[in-house]
Image (spheres, helix red, strand yellow):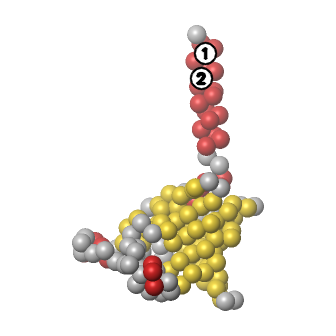
């Protein structure tokens, strides 16, 4: 009986270690640099995505349903920003998440992005468009 319990505990421990892959450490809810949005980073298949799960401007007006009015595609301008994926297609490679796309609803701009996870536990979002690069730091919530 002791051996059975020990075996079950060992298998549970090994399963827990396997579930915590280094590539998954970005999974969770993050507050953007401006503290205006919370973005949930999640994994689907072998890619990582980020969707808006909270908007600061809804704190004062919970009935507000902000639409994607600046989207370059007129057919998407009536979609709700809350719940929208703003990061798509990130792939984990060599300790970084690369080849992603980020969308900024405020400006209606799509850009390339990659993500790094520095030792301080924050997310470093590197956005590139037309030769220009901007870095943002997001904090875990």
CA distance for labels 1 and 2: 6 Å
- At x 53%, y 58%, the residue is 42
Q: Residues within 10 Å of mark 2 (few under 14, many from 20)?
A: few
Callout 1–callout 2 Cβ contact below 8 Å = yes
Q: From the image, tell me which residue sits under label 1.
A: 4
Picture quadrant of residue 77: bottom left
- At x 65%, y 56%, the residue is 46
Picture quadrant of residue 94: bottom right
- At x 34%, y 74%, the residue is 56
Relative to 100, 31 lies left or right: left
Residues 55 and 17: in front is 55
Q: From the image, tell me which residue sits under label 2.
A: 8
Residues 42 and 38: in front is 42
- 133 above or below 97? below
Residue 130 lies, in percent from the top left, at 67, 89
Residue 62 lies, in percent from the top left, at 25, 70
- Under circle 2, the secondary element is helix
């Amino acid at each position: 009986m002791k051996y059975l319990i020990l075996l079950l505990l060992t298998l549970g421990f090994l399963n827990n270690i396997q579930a915590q892959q280094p590539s998954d450490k970005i999974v969770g809810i993050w507050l953007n640099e401006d503290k205006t949005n919370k973005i949930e980073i999640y994994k689907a298949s072998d890619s990582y995505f980020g969707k808006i799960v909270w908007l600061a401007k809804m704190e004062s007006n919970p009935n507000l349903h902000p639409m994607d009015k600046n989207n370059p595609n007129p057919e998407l301008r009536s979609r709700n920003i809350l719940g929208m994926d703003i990061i798509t297609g990130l792939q984990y490679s060599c300790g970084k998440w690369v080849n992603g796309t980020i969308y900024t609803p405020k400006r209606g701009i799509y850009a390339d992005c990659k993500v790094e996870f520095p030792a301080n536990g924050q997310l470093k979002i590197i956005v590139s468009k037309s030769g220009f690069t901007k870095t943002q730091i997001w904090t875990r919530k």
